[in-house]
Amino acid sequence: MKILATDLDRTLLPNGSWESDSEAIGLFNDLTEKNDVLVVYVTGRNLALTENAIKEFGVRYPNILCSDVGTSIRKYENGEWKFDEGWVDHVKKQSPRWDAMAIRDAVVGINGMREQESEHLNQFKQSYYVEHEKNDRVLKQVDERVKGKFDEVIVYSFDSQDGKGLLDFLPASATKQTALEYVAEEFGAAKEDIVFCGDSGNDIFPLTAGFCGVLVKNADDQLVENVKKAMHQNPELQVYFAKGDFKGLNGYYTSGVIEGAYHYRVFD
Ligand SMILES: [Mg+2]
């Protein structure tokens, strides 16, 4: 089985400031269908925002959705979403000290961060907006109060498009990486048979976890740098950097995903 996993915003979705190929999304939809590829979306979006993206951009429904930065998994079958309760049990077992409310209490009063709206929070996702220019100081205080106490990971990413700093507390067992590992195991796929495409921040985890990685051409400089560092430390990592000028496509967003999928022979 061929599994193609991809981040959405500014990876599969052309919602950044770079120019996009108008035919790329139709091509992605056709190629995944024709090549019988299992498509997985791995995104920070929640379910409602994912459905908005599908409608707005015309990307196909995925077979599997790892949403809310990997904290929820759903299958899409016969026109319906099926929530994966097994994932919830798995995370609770793997991260027994996880406690979103205790983290919330622990960070109360840190200047420069504010809790995100309730639709961006769930039992495994406690998230904040951070004033980016204060992020060093905020993250230092966050570490002092939280780090290592709740079986958590602390993920900071900067959205260059709207200038927002985003801070997620997640169980260490419920990230984009571990969600994709769980999907791999369910389908009996080896990690090196799964392609993952990303562009920024929290994509670093699945890109350096042994999957076949793809960076679209518009990937953040910081992500490119971090991935190169990881490749230097672990020469077995496979990551492809989309270059563009490929079958008439420019390498940005969807075009980079298609280029990467061809590179790993997901598409013939
Ligand atoms: Mg992205």
Image (tube, rainbow, N blue to C red):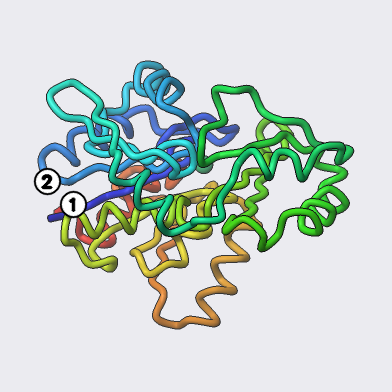
Mark 1 residue crowding within 10 angstroms, few (<14) / some (14–19) / many (20+)? some
Q: Secondary structure at mark 2?
A: loop
- 183 left or right of 46 in image: left
| Frontmost residue, 5 versus 139 | 139
The residue pinned by badge 2 equals: 35
- 16 left or right of 39 in image: right
| Frontmost residue, 29 versus 61 | 61
Residue 158 visible in the current orientation: no
The residue pinned by badge 1 equals: 267
Q: Residue at x 46, y 22 (%)?
A: 49
Coordinates of residue 54 in the picture (x, y in percent): 35, 23
CB of mark 1 within 8 Å of CB of mark 2?
yes
Q: Amino acid at mark 2?
A: Asn
Q: Residue at x 27, y 50 (%)?
A: 4
Coordinates of residue 181 in the picture (x, y in percent): 33, 59
Coordinates of residue 15 in the picture (x, y in percent): 52, 29
